Image (tube, rainbow, N blue to C red):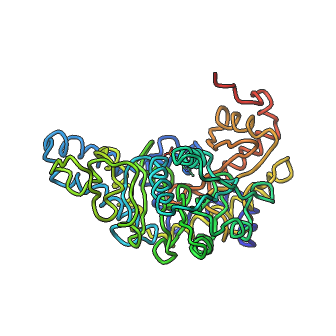
C-alpha cells in the first residue's frame, strides 16, 4: 500500500510509469478501443471486445457456417460446450470433463439448485447471504416453490454496511438440515471474496452441498474448485472472460457427484445418445447430462476466442495485476475522494477483495449519470449508493484509473451531478 500511496502522490506521471512497467500492459492493445478518452470501469459487467474475436467470428460465419453448412456439427461444433468448458475449467482449477459452456448463468443455477435439492431429500434448509445477487435468490425461491415450499431460505446478514459477511456466521447458519449453501465467490456490490475452501468444508461437514456463483471471480480471482472439493459452480462469460453480451455461461459439476445428480431439464443434448432418438430419456454420463439443447455456436465461438487469449496469461499474473489496479484505485480514493463525501464500499484488505472497487456517495446515482453524460467515464451504479468501478486486469490501465478518479473528483467538486435526477424513473 505504501508503494501505491507514493504512486498516487506522483500524479499522472506515476500512472504512466506504472503502465510502463506493467508486464500485462500490452494485452490492452489486443482489444478494440475506439475512443481512448473513454474511461471504462465496467469491464466487470461487459468485458471489452478482443480484436481476435472479430476475425474468429468472421471465420466461423463465412467458412464454418457459410461454406461448411450443417457439416460444422461434425467439424467441432458438437463438442464445443465441453471444449470451451475445459478451457474455462483451466481458469478455475478444474480438471477436464467437469465444466460445460451453455445456457445462461440463471438457467445453470436453476439446474444446479434443483439437482442439489433432489440429492438431499429430507433436508429443508437453504443458506445464502444478504449480499448475494438478487437474481440468484429469485432462482432459489422458484426452486423452493417447485419443490412444494418445503424448504426455507435463510440469508446470513452483513454487519459492516454490506462490505463483508462474517464467515463464522455462515458456518453457524449451516446445520444438519441444510441441503444447499449458495454463495457468490465475489459479491457483486462490495467485491468481497469469500473463503471458498473454508465454507465448502463447513457445508460438507454437515452433509450439505455447495453451489458457488463465480460470475465476478472467473477470470479475475484464482480458485481451486477440484482441490477445495466444490460440488457445483456456475458463472457468466461476459464479464472478465470477455465473451460478449449475453455470452453462454458455464456450469461445473464435480466428477465425484456427476453420475448421482440429475439436471431438471431433460433435453436431447443431455441424453445418452441424442441421435438414437429414443422415446425415453436416459441421462448421458458425466457433465454432458447438464446440457439441454443445441449450443449457440456463434456466441460460443466468441467465448472460445477470448479464452484462447486469456488462458495462456495465467491466473497468477492476472490476479497480481488485478490487485495492483485495485490497490492503486484505493490509494487515489484516499487522496482525492474520501474528503469529498465518498466512503469506501469495498474491503481494504486485498486478500478479500475481487477486481472491482465500490465507492459510496449519497448522491451516487446522480454522479453516475454526470460521469457518463459529461466526463466520458463509464462506471456502474448499484443501489442504494454504490458507484462500482470495475478494473479489468487485461484491459484497464493505471492511466485510465488516474483519469477516472480525476474526473470523478472534478464532477463532485464542480457539482455537475446536481442537475441529474436523484431517483430512477419507475418502470411501469
Ligand atoms: C453474480 C451474478 N449472478 C448471476 C447473474 C445472472 O446472469 P444471467 O443474466 O446471465 O443469467 C449475474 C448477472 O450479472 C451476476 O452478476
Q: Can you see residue 21?
A: no
How many numbered tags mark residues here? Answer: 0
Q: Determine whether, in the image, residue 88 is placed left or right of residue 428.
A: left
Q: Position of residue 177 (x, y in %)?
A: 62, 65
Quarter holding the C terminus?
top right
Farthest top residue?
Answer: 428
Q: Quadrant for residue 304, please give it.
A: bottom left
State whether residue 42 is above or below residue 167: above
Q: Position of residue 252 (x, y in %)?
A: 43, 62
Farthest front residue?
Answer: 122
* Residue positioned 75% across, 34% down in the render: 366
In-front residue for pair 357/299: 299
Q: Determine whether, in the image, residue 124 is placed left or right of residue 228.
A: right
Q: Position of residue 37 (x, y in %)?
A: 58, 43
Q: Position of residue 314 (x, y in %)?
A: 45, 70
* Residue positioned 56% across, 55% down in the render: 396
* Residue positioned 64% across, 25% down in the render: 427
Q: Determine whether, in the image, residue 355 is placed left or right of residue 305.
A: right
Q: Quadrant for residue 426, please give it.
A: top right
Q: Can you see residue 94?
A: yes
In-front residue for pair 385/184: 184
Quarter holding the N terminus?
bottom right
Amino acid at each position: 500500500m505504501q508503494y501505491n500511496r507514493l504512486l498516487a502522490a506522483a500524479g499522472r506521471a506515476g500512472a504512466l510509469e506504472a503502465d510502463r512497467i506493467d508486464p500485462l500492459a500490452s494485452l490492452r492493445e489486443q482489444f478494440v478501443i475506439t475512443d481512448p478518452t473513454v474511461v471504462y470501469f465496467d469491464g466487470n459487467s461487459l468485458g471489452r471486445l478482443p480484436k481476435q474475436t472479430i476475425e474468429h467470428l468472421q471465420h466461423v460465419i463465412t467458412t464454418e457456417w457459410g461454406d461448411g453448412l450443417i457439416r460444422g456439427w461434425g467439424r467441432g461444433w458438437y463438442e464445443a460446450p465441453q471444449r470451451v468448458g475445459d478451457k474455462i475449467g483451466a481458469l478455475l482449477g478444474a480438471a477436464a470433463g467437469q465444466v460445460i459452456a451453455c445456457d445462461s448463468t440463471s438457467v445453470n443455477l436453476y439446474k444446479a439448485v434443483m439437482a442439489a435439492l433432489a440429492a438431499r431429500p429430507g433436508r429443508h434448509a437453504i443458506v445464502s447471504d444478504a449480499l448475494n445477487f438478487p437474481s440468484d435468490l429469485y432462482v432459489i425461491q422458484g426452486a423452493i416453490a417447485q419443490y412444494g415450499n418445503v424448504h426455507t431460505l435463510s440469508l446470513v446478514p452483513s454487519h459492516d454496511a454490506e462490505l463483508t459477511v462474517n464467515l463464522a456466521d455462515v458456518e453457524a447458519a449451516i446445520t444438519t438440515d441444510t441441503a444447499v449453501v449458495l454463495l457468490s465467490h465475489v459479491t457483486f456490490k462490495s467485491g468481497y471474496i469469500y473463503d471458498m475452501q473454508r465454507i465448502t468444508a463447513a457445508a460438507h461437514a454437515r452433509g450439505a452441498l455447495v453451489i458457488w456463483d463465480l460470475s465476478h471471480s472467473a477470470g479475475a480471482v484464482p480458485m481451486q474448485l477440484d482441490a477445495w472439493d466444490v460440488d457445483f459452480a456456475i458463472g457468466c462469460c461476459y464479464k472478465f472472460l470477455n465473451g460478449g453480451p449475453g455470452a453462454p455461461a458455464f456450469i461445473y459439476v464435480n466428477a465425484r457427484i456427476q453420475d448421482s445428480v440429475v439436471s431438471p431439464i431433460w433435453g436431447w443434448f443431455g441424453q445418452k445418445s441424442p441421435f438414437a432418438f429414443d422415446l425415453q430419456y436416459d441421462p448421458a454420463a458425466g457433465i454432458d447430462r447438464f446440457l439441454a439443447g443445441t449450443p449457440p455456436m456463434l456466441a460460443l465461438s466468441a467465448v472460445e476466442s477470448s479464452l484462447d487469449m486469456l488462458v495462456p496469461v495465467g491466473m497468477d499474473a492476472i490476479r497480481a495485476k488485478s490487485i495492483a489496479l485495485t490497490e492503486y484505485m484505493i490509494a487515489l480514493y484516499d487522496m482525492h475522494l474520501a474528503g469529498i463525501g465518498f466512503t469506501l464500499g469495498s474491503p481494504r484488505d486485498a486478500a478479500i477483495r475481487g477486481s472491482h472497487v465500490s465507492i459510496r456517495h449519497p448522491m451516487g446515482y446522480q454522479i453516475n449519470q454526470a460521469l457518463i453524460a459529461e466526463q466520458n467515464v463509464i462506471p456502474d451504479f448499484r443501489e442504494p449508493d454504490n458507484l462500482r468501478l470495475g478494473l479489468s486486469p487485461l484491459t484497464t490501465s493505471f492511466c485510465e484509473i488516474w483519469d477516472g478518479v480525476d474526473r470523478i473528483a472534478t464532477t463532485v467538486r464542480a457539482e455537475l451531478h446536481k442537475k441529474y435526477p436523484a431517483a430512477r424513473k419507475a418502470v411501469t
